[in-house]
Image (cartoon, helix red, strand yellow):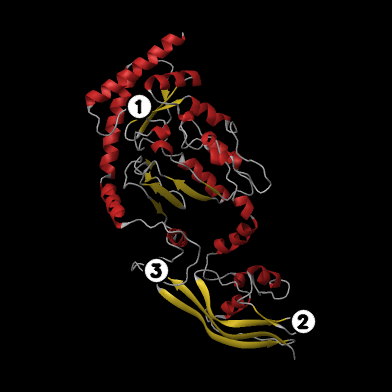
Amino acid sequence: MKKLIEIRGVSVNFYTYEGVVNALNELCLDIYEGETLGLVGETGCGKTMAALSILRLIMPPGKIESGNIYFYNNDNIPTDLLVIRESEIRAIRGSQISMVFQEPAAALNPVYTIGDQITEVILLHRRQELARKVLAEIDESLTLDPDDVRRKITDKTQGVIPVHMLGNPCDMNRIMGIAREHRLFTLEDGCQALGAGYKGKKVGSFGDMAAFSLNVNKTITAGDGGLAVTDNKRLYERAFGFHDQGHIPSLLGVEFGARTILGLNLKLNELTGAFAIGQLRKLDRIVQTLKVKKKLFKDAITAGGVRNMEFRKINDPDECHTILTVMFPDARTARRVAQSLGTITVAESGWHVYSNMEHLLAYKDEDGNRPYRCHMLPQTDDILSRAVNLSVGVVDPGIGASFGINILSKDQEIQRKAKMFVDTVKSSEASMN
């Protein structure tokens, strides 16, 4: 009989937190044409791993450590399935070698969650679509407008990234409701809102994963760098691998096992980490100090009796209090006031406004089209053109917060800056009438 499959010395290991798990050990067998081979054994003995090895479908944290799997074609020429290119093994899978299971449950790999395995096929076929970022409008809080998020969702949508902008939490009740309804992955951008809360929970604890910044212009700083947080073990391992050259994390501080992804080298140095720990211990005190100073600043401006001006919507009083944003009735007034104060409107700040991101606007998709363009978000454009940021805890020209106070400002300075702002607004109104 003609030989179809020849397996020699195949070993498979899985690298886990608890150590290395050996799934196959020096497997050897031959399969001939017309022959039926039955593998009998208890659950977990390696039957599925043997079949997955033949198709080279062992996924991280698993790895085929050694051995050869020869597949004989019609000309009786053997091909080692473990050394050929991925494109070649894909041509063989399904057309010349297939896996057929008796029941759906048997088709699921016990190493991974059911959701991961079901979505993997979808993700592989939507790789191009996943590269497309869809921009949604903001509302008067300067954070994502949940109504527009819902309008932008399609059957291709995979996730949502709520950005807690300028220390103000997003409307997470509505956003998470939408995410759960459509089963979307949620990544919170809390870079400007470390320490903020929403409905009794800290930002960063709502979604699947969250990111925070330790840049000098944030609530706390360690010079630079940042934090990624999650309660999902698999996401943690992938994030760790991305930041440390693909390694799997070890609680002993030493990498071990096969690397699962092509990671970068983004490790934080010990000195920066020490600064970050010290700053985290002071975070609550910093936020409370900013809360007091922002209230004094805001109350003093309100007492000035400025007409035709309001403050941006705050989604929860447990914000970071780093910025006081004022909204004017039109862009002309906002620009005039900003210029008189030696600052700019939020629309003119370049760091976080889509229409000022030249690299975003220059992006072309696979068909050569430019999906991002100026004026594509009219509601956002209108709101940002009427908004002026006043500094409280973050003094950053990059977000248009050049004028205002800071965390060290005394009461007298706060009153003086408030009066300067009120006088400037009133003078601007008088000159325009």
Q: Residue at x 66, y 72 (%)?
A: 89
Which residue carries the number 2 mark? 74
Q: CA distance from mark 1 to mark 2?
A: 78 Å
The 10 Å Cα crowd at callout 1, few under 14, some 14 to 19, many 20 or more, is many
How crowded is the residue under tag 2: few (<14 C-alpha within 10 Å), some, or many (20+)? Answer: few
Question: What residue is drawn where x is 34% and y is 15%?
Answer: 423
Determine whether, in the image, residue 76 is placed left or right of residue 273: right
Query: Mark 2 falls on what kind of element?
Result: loop
Residue named by callout 1: 403
Residue 59 can be seen, yes or no: yes
Q: Is residue 230 left or right of residue 223?
A: right
Q: Is the residue marked by circle 3 packed among few (<14), some (14-19), or many (20+) residues within 10 Å?
A: some
| N-terminal-most mark, 1 or 2 | 2
Q: CA distance from mark 3 to mark 2?
A: 45 Å
**Cα gap from disc 3 to disc 1, whole angstroms:** 47 Å
* Dot placed on the residue nearer the N-terminal end, 3 or 2: 2
Callout 1: SS: loop
Residue at mark 3: 255
Seen in the image, is 102 located left or right of residue 430?
A: right
Establish if 433 lies above or below 229.
above
Residue flagged by tag 1: what amino acid is it? Phe
